């Protein structure tokens, strides 16, 4: 989004602009009344990125709110209890990198295994699976979306990510909220079922490759697979237990968000496994996650990654 349009958007949304240049617009975080201590953002801490010919993102370094322009509008609508549909249309942006049109996709009929799973759910958790929500549109190819059977759950306004075991059996599903701040962020469709032993994407694990790429969330998995990487699994906030893979692998790449929390988590995992495996922590550009990165950035980060520990050889 161009600078002038961002300024206009801020005006339309009553967001107070502090300063701007050709790179970004610095504003007082409009989520401050709900998300900042004291209810104000005096610093101010939010930046909206100027993009001449691509989509803009916003990021508040105080409360962590971030996303595309439409997320900003939709979240503000939610918090302020305002109808911003006109603004969503007015400021609609077409990402350049996107390779499919969500409006083309109609997935009204779930696949058989999903159907089986869905019918065992209590009524209130039964999703109404339809075409993909536009929120999913992060430039992930239709082929990958189909491969992972990602759907939109209309009933709960969530993106439906089925979770499969390494044997390819459907075990549960996560529903990630469409907007930024809905609670819970992830809905576990199978109540009382612990997903902690499963990784998003493990159904595609290929033993012969000998390695694993660990990422944090589902979108990171989709993005990496879209870029052509294999054996990518999402740890989904759990402390990963890789025992089911361990006999097939001798190397892991940890590709977590390059923020404070992500780096800390990466070190925890590395420390746990470096004695048994070659562990490489892949450092992405500062404050980026795999979804924010181009293919080249990820390639370069992997190329530059260093071995965390030396593999201990078993003496027979
Ligand atoms: Zn904020």
Image (tube, grey):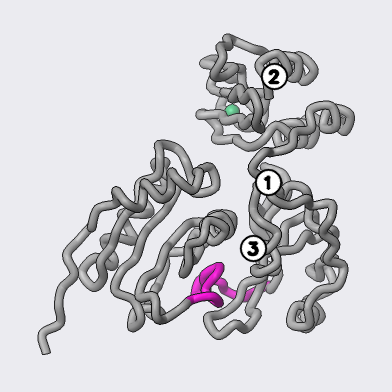
Give the label on residue 98, or none.
1
Residue 192 forms part of the magenta stretch:
yes
Residue 142 forms part of the magenta stretch:
no
Q: Quadrant of residue 176?
A: bottom right
Left or right: residue 89 versus residue 46 is right
Q: Residues within 10 Å of mark 3 (few under 14, many from 20)?
A: some
Q: Earlier in the sequence, mark 3 or mark 2?
A: 2
- Closer to us: 211 or 122: 211
Instruction: Look at mark 3 in the image and give the residue it sits on.
Output: 144
Q: Quadrant of residue 70?
A: top right
Marks 2 & 1, CB-CB < 8 Å contact: no
Label 3 and label 1: CA atoms lie apart by 13 Å
Q: Quadrant of ligand 1?
A: top right
SS type, badge 2: helix
Considering only vertical position in the picture, is 68 above or below 261?
above
Q: Residue at x 48, y 67 (%)?
A: 230
Considering only vertical position in the picture, is 250 above or below 153?
below
Helix, strand or loop: magenta stretch: loop
Give the label on residue 236, or none.
none
Q: Earlier in the sequence, mark 3 or mark 1?
A: 1
Percent x, y for residue 303? 32, 51
SS type, badge 1: loop
Percent x, y for residue 242? 39, 74
Q: Nearer the viewer, mark 2 or mark 1?
A: 1
Label 2 and label 1: CA atoms lie apart by 21 Å
Q: Nearer the viewer, mark 3 or mark 2?
A: 3
Give the label on residue 6, or none.
2
Considering only vertical position in the picture, is 186 above or below 62?
below
- Magenta segment, which residues? 191-205
Q: Residue at x 23, y 57 (%)?
A: 308
Label 3 and label 2: CA atoms lie apart by 32 Å
Percent x, y for residue 269? 34, 61
């Amino acid at each position: 989004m161009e600078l002038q349009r961002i300024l206009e958007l801020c005006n339309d949304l009553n967001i107070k602009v502090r300063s701007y240049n050709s790179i970004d617009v610095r504003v007082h975080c409009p989520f401050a009344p709900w998300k900042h201590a004291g209810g104000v953002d005096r610093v101010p801490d939010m930046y909206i990125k100027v993009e001449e010919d691509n989509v803009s993102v916003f990021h508040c370094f105080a409360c962590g709110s971030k996303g595309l322009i439409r997320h900003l509008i939709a979240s503000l609508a939610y918090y302020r209890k305002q109808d911003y549909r006109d603004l969503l249309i007015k400021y609609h942006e077409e990402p350049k990198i996107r390779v499919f049109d969500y409006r083309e996709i109609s997935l009204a009929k779930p696949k058989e295994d999903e159907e089986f799973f869905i019918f065992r759910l209590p009524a209130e958790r039964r999703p109404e699976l339809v075409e993909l929500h536009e929120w999913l549109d992060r430039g992930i190819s239709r082929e990958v979306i189909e491969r992972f059977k990602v759907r939109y759950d209309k009933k709960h306004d969530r993106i439906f990510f089925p979770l499969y075991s390494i044997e390819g059996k459907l075990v549960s599903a996560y529903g990630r909220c469409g907007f930024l701040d809905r609670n819970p962020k992830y809905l576990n469709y199978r109540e009382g079922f612990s997903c902690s032993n499963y990784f998003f994407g493990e159904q595609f694990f290929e033993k012969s490759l000998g390695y694993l790429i660990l990422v944090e969330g589902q979108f990171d998995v989709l993005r990496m697979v879209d870029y052509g990487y294999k054996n990518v699994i999402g740890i989904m906030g759990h402390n990963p237990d890789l025992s089911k893979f361990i006999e097939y692998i001798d190397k892991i790449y940890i590709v977590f968000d390059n923020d404070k929390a992500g780096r800390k988590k990466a070190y925890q995992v590395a420390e746990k496994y470096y004695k048994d495996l070659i562990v490489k922590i892949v450092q992405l550009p500062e404050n980026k996650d795999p979804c924010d990165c181009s293919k080249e950035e990820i390639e370069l980060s992997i190329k530059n990654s260093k071995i965390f520990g030396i593999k201990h050889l078993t003496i027979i």
